[in-house]
Image: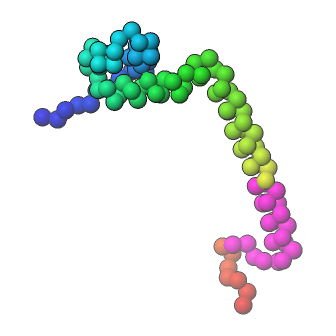
């Protein structure tokens, strides 16, 4: 007889974590009422507290903009490196990789 793991919806996790944060019930009462382990409730509360600022959409957008700017800078650097390597290979008259062997 295999025991199947329970899956909790994000709404359920938020409701349980908010009940713990609100302090309307003790952790033991919440665990008993919802039939979840105390470690799980604690983890949900920590996740809620860590990501609460995202509920208002402020921090997430700036993080994405910063990441996009970083990636655009990286693409620019890599494009420049490719162009430099192309020019260097024509100046050195070296056959491109995969087209024969190196001259001896």
Q: Residue at x 34, y 30 (%)?
A: 39
Q: Is residue 31 left or right of residue 11?
A: left
| 11 falls in the magenta region | no
Check the image and report above or below for 104 versus 82.
below
Position of residue 24 measured from the top left corner of the image (x, y, whole percent):
39, 9
Position of residue 77 measured from the top left corner of the image (x, y, whole percent):
79, 53
Position of residue 57 measured from the top left corner of the image (x, y, whole percent):
64, 20
Q: Quadrant of the C terminus?
A: bottom right
- Give the quarter of the image for residue 31: top left
Q: Residue at x 80, y 66 (%)?
A: 85
- Secondary structure that dominates the magenta span: helix
Name the one closer to the observer, 86 or 33: 33
Q: Residue at x 46, y 27 (%)?
A: 46
Q: Is residue 39 left or right of residue 49?
A: left
| 87 falls in the magenta region | yes
Q: Is residue 91 left or right of residue 7?
A: right
Numbered circles on residues, count: 0
Q: Quadrant of the N terminus?
A: top left
The stretch in magenta equals 78-97
């Amino acid at each position: 007889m295999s025991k199947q793991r329970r899956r909790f919806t994000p709404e359920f996790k938020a409701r349980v974590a908010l009940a713990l944060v609100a302090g309307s019930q003790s952790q033991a009462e919440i665990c008993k009422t919802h039939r979840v382990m105390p470690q799980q409730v604690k983890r949900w509360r920590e996740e809620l507290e860590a990501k609460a600022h995202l509920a208002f959409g402020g921090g997430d957008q700036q993080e994405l903009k910063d990441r996009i700017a970083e990636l655009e800078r990286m693409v620019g650097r890599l494009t420049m490196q490719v162009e430099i390597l192309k020019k260097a290979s024509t100046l050195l008259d070296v056959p491109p990789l995969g087209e024969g062997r190196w001259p001896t």
